[in-house]
Amino acid sequence: MSTRDTLRTFIVDTFFVDDFADDDSFLRKGLIDSTGMMELVAFIETEFHIKLDDKELVPENLDSLSRVVAFVDRKKSLAKAS
């Protein structure tokens, strides 16, 4: 399963939302609240075996499916290069 599909499945199953576009803002659309963001971060760290630093917990990385996918893929690439 792709990064996108894995993340979309988690979001749909955990937050009971399925009608959202990849670029929809989680926070502005009310899809995921601040507590939900912490659940998403925990899932990312567990599922993809990457550690997120506090400075990375920003909307630019986590506020839409497309942003999360790009962020996770970058982190995985960096981990492989190390």
Image (cartoon, helix red, strand yellow):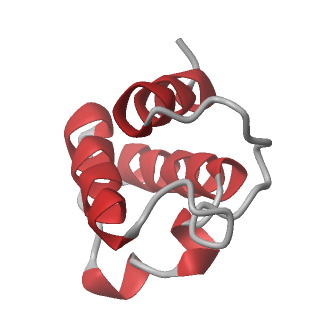
Residue at the far top: name it: 1
Occupied quadrant, residue 17: top right
Near-viewer residue (70 or 21): 21
Q: Is residue 29 left or right of residue 63?
A: right
Q: Position of residue 52 (x, y in %)?
A: 29, 66
Occupied quadrant, residue 3: top right
Q: Position of residue 56 (x, y in %)?
A: 41, 78
Near-viewer residue (30 or 51): 30
Near-viewer residue (21 or 68): 21
Near-viewer residue (31 or 67): 31
Q: Is residue 55 left or right of residue 5?
A: left
Q: Position of residue 72 (x, y in %)?
A: 49, 50
Task: Determine whether 9 is above or below 27 in the image.
Answer: above
Report the residue at 47% width, 58% height from top.
32
Task: Determine whether 60 is above or below 32 in the image.
Answer: below
Task: Determine whether 29 is above or below 44 in the image.
Answer: below
Q: Is residue 82 left or right of residue 2?
A: left
Report the residue at 35% width, 72% height from top.
34
Report the residue at 76% width, 44% height from top.
22
- Label count reads 0
Report the residue at 57% width, 78% height from top.
59
Q: Position of residue 37 (x, y in %)?
A: 36, 62
Occupied quadrant, residue 8: top right
